[in-house]
């Protein structure tokens, strides 16, 4: 069970003067129900993940969730989970909308995935006396107030930005206005090299490359968008100054050679001033 302390912690700070009253309210809101246990399960999941505790992490998933996430049964998943777990760590930002109904529950789990903010609805089931995670469903992410929104239109075969990136405090509102599915790969790239050369190098390295081609310093964000689909890319903190490229390497489905969209012009760049 959660302590009162974790309950208070979840609500952020409480003014000292109303402490006792607020604490009483919190006990009613927080204690007794399955809500606390559901939230605690997500916190434990995050703690196991960040602590690189693969078996502890898998213990909090149902068999179905293990199969969905890793494509193999539990007894085969541990080794592959152990390789990737905890890197980079997840920062839990917010738990909200806890809904418990008998032996099932859902909770919205806002966290970082690398530099990006993600919201997932976590489905849970109670097995014996333990809540377990049964699945994850991505939810829309809002661009926070005060953060400059840059629209990004994806079409065949180009990205169009509707504003200038004046500093790193931006979020991207991506709209696929095309007929094909598009991805958006946002990468920090080296100064100097012409973008076309970089596109060629990435396309030729393909997904099999163990290391990113020279000139690609970091993959900062990734998203894929079906025709007509929209989605926001929100960053946990402002983008560092530097040069950034946007790319789509999905294959042209109407092209017998399945040429990546980037090789047909679907890339662009911007800089965050230092
Ligand atoms: Cu594309």
Image (cartoon, rainbow, N blue to C red):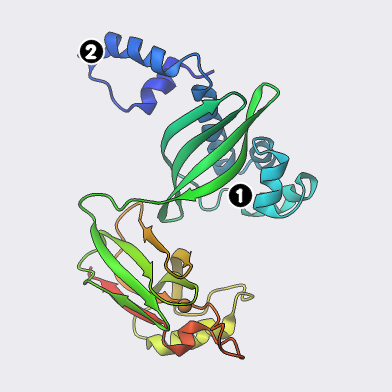
Q: Secondary structure at mark 2?
A: helix
- Residue 190 position in % (x across, y down): 38, 78
Image quarter of the C terminus: bottom left
Residue under label 2: 18
Earlier in the chain: of badge 2 and badge 1, it is 2
Q: Position of residue 268 (x, y in %)?
A: 35, 80
Of residue 155 and residue 37, the one placed in the foreground of this image is: 155
Indicate the secondary structure of the residue bearing disc 1. Answer: loop
Q: Where residue 212 appears, x then y in whole percent?
A: 53, 74
Q: CA distance from mark 2 to mark 1?
A: 42 Å
> Is residue 81 at all visible to an observer of this figure?
no
| Residue ID for mark 1 | 85
Does 107 appear above or below 2?
Answer: below
Q: Quadrant of the N terminus?
A: top right
Residue drawn at (37%, 21%) of the image: 8
Find residue 13 and name its label: none
Give left or right: position of 172 versus 116.
left
Viewer-proximal residue, 136 or 58? Answer: 136
Count every numbered label the image shows and give the total. Answer: 2
Q: Is mark 1 within 8 Å of ligand 1?
A: no
| Residue at 34 percent of width and 26 percent of height | 11
Rendered view: 45 above or below 198: above
Q: Does the rendering let one see residue 57? A: yes
Question: Quick one: 154 or 89, which is closer to the camera?
Answer: 154
Question: Residue 138 in the image: x percent, y percent?
Answer: 49, 50
**Badge 2 residue CB within 8 Å of ligand 1:** no
Instruction: Give residue 228's quadrant in the image.
Output: bottom left
| For residue 86, above or below residue 10 | below
Q: Is the residue marked by circle 1 packed among few (<14), some (14-19), or many (20+) residues within 10 Å?
A: some
Give the label, 2 or 1, closer to the camera. Answer: 2
């Amino acid at each position: 069970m959660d302590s009162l302390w974790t309950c208070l912690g979840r609500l952020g700070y409480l003014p000292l003067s109303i402490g006792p009253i607020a604490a009483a309210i919190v006990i009613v809101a927080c204690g007794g129900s399955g809500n606390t246990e559901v939230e605690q399960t997500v916190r434990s999941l995050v703690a196991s993940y960040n602590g690189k505790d693969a078996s502890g992490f898998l213990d909090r998933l149902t068999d179905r969730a293990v199969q969905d996430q890793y494509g193999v049964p539990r007894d085969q998943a541990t080794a592959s989970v152990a390789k990737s777990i905890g890197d980079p760590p997840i920062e839990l930002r917010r738990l909200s909308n806890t809904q418990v109904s008998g032996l099932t529950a859902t909770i919205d789990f806002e966290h970082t995935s690398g530099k990006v903010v993600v919201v997932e609805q976590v489905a849970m089931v109670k097995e014996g006396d333990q809540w377990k995670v049964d699945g994850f469903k991505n939810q829309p992410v809002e661009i926070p107030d005060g953060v400059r929104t840059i629209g990004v239109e994806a079409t065949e075969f180009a990205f169009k930005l509707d504003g200038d990136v004046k500093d790193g405090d931006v979020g991207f509102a991506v709209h696929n206005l095309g007929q094909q599915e598009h991805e958006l790969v946002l990468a920090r790239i080296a100064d100097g090299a012409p973008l076309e050369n970089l596109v060629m190098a990435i396309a030729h390295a393909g997904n099999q490359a163990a290391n990113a081609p020279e000139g690609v310093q970091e993959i900062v964000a990734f998203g894929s968008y079906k025709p007509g689909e929209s989605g926001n890319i929100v960053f946990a903190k402002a983008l560092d100054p530097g040069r950034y490229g946007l790319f789509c390497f999905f294959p042209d489905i109407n092209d017998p050679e399945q040429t990546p969209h980037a090789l047909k012009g679907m890339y662009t760049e911007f800089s965050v001033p230092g």
